[in-house]
């Protein structure tokens, strides 16, 4: 009986809230509508908040409510997990009010929302790049912000996602081998470019090992007159790899590659 009464009361409150919301939407009283939007936001009714604020923000431009209403509009979308819309309004805010009361938070949430919305590595990474740009801009503007460490960690994670995508691309080239061309060379170029762009990535070891393996397979599958030169390149890559990662989990595989290359070049 108590449970049933609780449900009935909850439904009554919900209906009452909807009734007031409909009343607000029909009202011409801007202050009343704004107060309701703020109350809706506080009560986590974010869709109601941003629906009302979308109408109010253009009207409030140039008024005392202009800054807060635009920021609150972005934050309503952010809390509702619509990070693309949120980012658009946050960007409007910090471009319109570069020294505004909420400029620091607007820059942070714009970037962090894109970070939260960043797709898996195998998908298009346009949003990942966008997130990095926004977060790096935030760090440039507010290096001493209490959110700087969060932004920096997000940037590193996003960089690793881009590197992982390049590692996947390089691995694909490696697996294609000599199919319709020298894909080993493409694997090497892709991996080396990723290393150059992100030298501190957690995937750097994987990329360097892939370069070594690609150089080795390229040498093995070469015509006879190119083998010695290419195996010498393999040996150079081997020494570069073990110098950087002497305790690598791939050390045994690297050592085996070196033995074969060294035997071919030096005949022992």
Image (cartoon, helix red, strand yellow):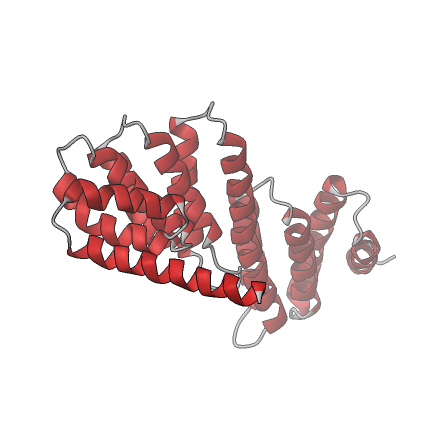
Q: Nearer the viewer, residue 178 or 113?
A: 113
Q: How many marks?
A: 0
Res. 35 image quadrant: top left
Residue 265 shown left or right of residue 8 in the figure: right
Where is residue 119? Give x, y as percent: 48, 59
Does any portion of residue 197 appear in the rendered image? yes
Q: Is residue 209 left or right of residue 92?
A: right
Furthest residue toward right: 268
Q: Residue at x 34, y 62 (%)?
A: 15
From the viewer's side, name the closer residue of 230 and 54.
54
Residue at image coords 68%, 69%: 224
Q: Position of residue 148 (x, y in %)?
A: 49, 30
Rendered location of residue 65, percent (x, y): 20, 34
Q: Quadrant of residue 267?
A: bottom right
Q: Single out the residue that lies furthest toward the top.
A: 144
Give me the residue at 54% from left, 52% from top: 161
Task: Reply above or below: 33 against 141.
Answer: below
Q: Is residue 177 visible?
A: no
Q: Nearer the viewer, residue 82 or 235?
A: 82
> In the rendered image, which quarter contains the C terminus?
bottom right
* Residue 21 percent coordinates (x, y): 27, 56
In the displayed structure, does residue 216 sit left or right of residue 150?
A: right
Q: Quadrant of the N terminus?
A: bottom right
Residue ranking furthest to the front: 1
For the point 30% across and 39% down, the residue is: 71
Residue closest to the eye, 96 or 213: 96
In this view, 91 is above or below 232: above
């Amino acid at each position: 009986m108590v449970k049933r009464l609780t449900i009935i009361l909850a439904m009554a409150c919900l209906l009452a809230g909807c009734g007031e919301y409909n009343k607000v939407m029909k009202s011409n009283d801007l202050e009343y509508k704004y107060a309701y939007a703020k109350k809706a936001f506080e009560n986590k009714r974010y869709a109601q908040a941003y629906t009302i604020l979308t109408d109010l923000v253009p009207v409030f431009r140039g008024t005392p409510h202009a800054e807060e209403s635009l920021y609150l509009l972005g934050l309503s979308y952010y809390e509702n997990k619509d990070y693309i819309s949120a980012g658009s309004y946050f960007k409007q805010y910090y471009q319109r009010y570069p020294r505004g009361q909420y400029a620091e938070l607007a820059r942070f949430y714009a970037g962090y929302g894109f970070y939260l919305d960043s797709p898996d590595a195998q998908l298009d990474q346009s949003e990942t790049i966008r997130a990095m740009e926004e977060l790096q801009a935030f760090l440039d503007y507010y290096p001493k912000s209490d959110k700087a460490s969060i932004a920096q960690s997000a940037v590193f994670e996003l960089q690793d996602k881009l590197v992982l995508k390049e590692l996947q691309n390089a691995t694909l080239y490696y697996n294609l081998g000599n199919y319709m061309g020298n894909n080993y060379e493409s694997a090497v170029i892709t991996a080396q470019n990723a290393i150059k762009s992100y030298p501190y990535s957690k995937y750097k070891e994987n990329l360097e090992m892939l370069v070594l393996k690609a150089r080795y397979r390229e040498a093995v599958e070469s015509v006879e007159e190119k083998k010695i030169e290419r195996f010498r390149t393999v040996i150079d890559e081997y020494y570069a790899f073990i110098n950087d990662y002497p305790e690598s989990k791939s050390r045994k595989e690297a050592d085996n590659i070196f033995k074969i290359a060294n035997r071919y070049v030096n005949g022992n």
